Image (cartoon, rainbow, N blue to C red):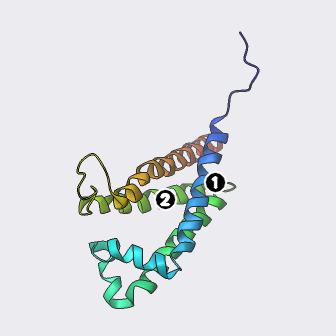
Amino acid sequence: MPSRFPAPSMDSAITVLRWSLVFIFLFFGTAKFAAYEAEGVAKIASHYPLFAWMYPLWGPYVASKVIGVIELSTAAALALGQWNTRISLLGGLMGMATFLVTLSFTLGAPLWEKGYGFPFIGAIAQFLFKDAGLFAASYAVFVFSAQRLRAADTSAA
């Protein structure tokens, strides 16, 4: 029996993932410029070796702004990647790197809510665990872009 609805394309799926990631990076990156977010990020990031050096050097507000600039740059690369495959590849890599870093915070963070224990995760785990799906979305954009670049290279040859 033929379907009345056209099958969605991979292009449309990647476009939805891309713009969802842009939305997330745009708003999370912008939030890094607010005091409440800088203080919240400092609770986790100031103890993490990759970021700990920034806090004594610049303080929580400048450190948060640096992270915000990285996130806004990732949003820009992903957005521009809609029209440029090489920039899309870069945006996917930047997203993957960001979410690998945040997922690595789970190694030392208190993940379970005090008084409940496993499997009842606390607020920090709720904030961090969603990044597994966001890493996968960034990876999908990266793979799609890499395949597009490879296809363009072989057709040009």
Split into 4 quadrants, where in the image is the C terminus? top right
Which is nearer the eye, 144 or 17?
Answer: 17
Which dot marks residue 95?
Answer: 2
Q: Is residue 147 above or below residue 22?
A: above
**Cα gap from disc 1 to disc 2, whole angstroms:** 12 Å
Residue 50: give x, y in percent of width and height: 31, 73
Split into 4 quadrants, where in the image is the N terminus? top right
Q: Which amino acid, mark 2?
A: Gly
Q: Which amino acid, mark 1?
A: Trp
Mark 1 or mark 2: whose residue is earlier in sequence: 1
Residue 137: give x, y in percent of width and height: 51, 48
Q: Nearer the viewer, mark 1 or mark 2?
A: 1
Q: Which residue position is annotated with label 1? A: 19
Which is nearer the eye, 145 or 9?
Answer: 9
- Residue drawn at x 23%, y 56% is 115
Which dot marks residue 61?
Answer: none
Outermost residue, front direction?
115
